[in-house]
Image (cartoon, rainbow, N blue to C red):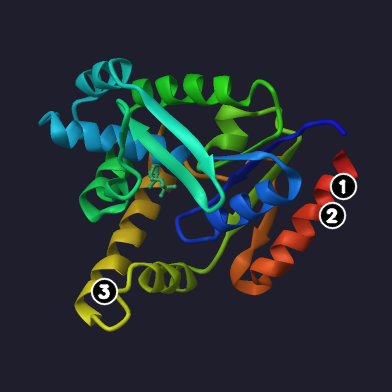
Amino acid sequence: LRKLVIAIDGPAGAGKSTIASRLARKLGYVNLESGAMYRALALKAIENDVSFDDSASLLRLAESSRIELQPQIDGNRVLLDGQNVSRRIRERDVTEGASRVSVHPPVREWMVARQREMGVNGGVIMEGRDIGTAVFPDADLKIFLDADPTVRAERRIEQNAAKNDEAAAKALREDLLRRDQRDTTRTASPLVPAADAIVLDSSKLGIEEVLTRIEQLIAERS
Ligand code: C5P
């Protein structure tokens, strides 16, 4: 069977990581979370006192970094210069930083070049915001996974154990909407479905149905 390249794009909380890791397990593919690379760079910027707005310094920082994604059963282990930063990069300051460093075209070009190298042999599911539009414009299958903002925020609130903390839940909702806004309005590779992407809505379908639908699409292309 041919080893495909599958792109999954969409906003935060649409279920991309869950879908990508479950599909990868079923197919024997690797799943790569491109967002974790932007997060790792944001962390490095925090550690080195580099501003999230300083495009040239961020590029230099990226060029001097070793960012590795190691696919695991339930997501990626992320190494920054050999250090396991998988947990740290999910915290709020890094999440906000990733959203801000990712607007800079030189940063994006550097990331896209690294991400293409990871996909050369196929058998890859990469998730992010620009995988179908910029990283793998020739991907065998492009999914744009969407969901209502309220549903996406509620999922994040569950994941972050902000359930019983109304202030934390409110902050999380606002953060998510702000990052959506930044992703969709930036000039460099904004978050939009590729012209040939198949749009699925995980608030209407549910994760199991989304998986079944994608498996059908893969079978048609293999
Ligand atoms: O997917 P995740 O939430 O980990 O991504 C963190 C941030 O990195 C996103 O908010 C988005 O701004 C940026 N990103 C991007 N392009 C990608 C993946 C992530 O701009 N392919």
- Looking at the rendered structure, the secondary structure element under dot 1 is helix
Q: Say if mark 2 contacts mark 1, CB within 8 Å.
A: yes
Amino acid type of the residue tagged 2 in the rendering: Gln
Query: Residue at coordinates 57% horizontally, 25% vertically from top-left?
Result: 118
Q: Earlier in the sequence, mark 2 or mark 3?
A: 3
> Quick one: label 3, few (<14), some, or many (20+) residues within 10 Å?
few
* Residue 114 horizontal side relative to residue 84, left or right: right
Looking at the rendering, which quadrant does residue 126 occupy? Answer: top right
Task: Judge whether 189 appears above or below 75 on screen.
Answer: above
For the residues labelled 3 and 1, the Cα–Cα distance comes to 41 Å
**Could you tell whether 140 is left or right of 31 in the image?**
right
Residue 180 visible:
yes
Please indicate, yes or no, whether residue 33 appears anywhere in the rendered image: no
Instruction: Return the residue nearer the eye: 52 or 29.
Output: 29
Q: Is residue 174 left or right of residue 116?
A: left
Quarter where residue 214 is shown: bottom right
Q: Is residue 30 above or below residue 148?
A: above
Instruction: Classify mark 2: residues with Cα within 10 Å, few (<14), some (14-19) or many (20+).
Output: few
Q: Vertical placement of 63 versus 44: above or below?
A: above
Q: Which residue is mark 1?
A: 219
Name the residue beneath numbered marker 3.
170
Quarter of the image with the N terminus is top right
Q: What amino acid does circle 1 point to? A: Ala
Q: Where is residue 222 shown, x and y percent of the image? A: 87, 38
Query: Which quarter holds ligand 1?
Result: top left
Kindly identify the amino acid type of the residue bearing the numbered disc 3.
Lys
Percent across and percent down for residue 95 are 29, 49
Q: CA distance from mark 2 to mark 1?
A: 5 Å
**Residue drawn at the location 59% of the way across and 34% of the way down:** 133
SS at badge 3: helix
Q: Which residue is mark 2?
A: 216
Looking at the image, is 211 positioned above or below residue 10?
Answer: below
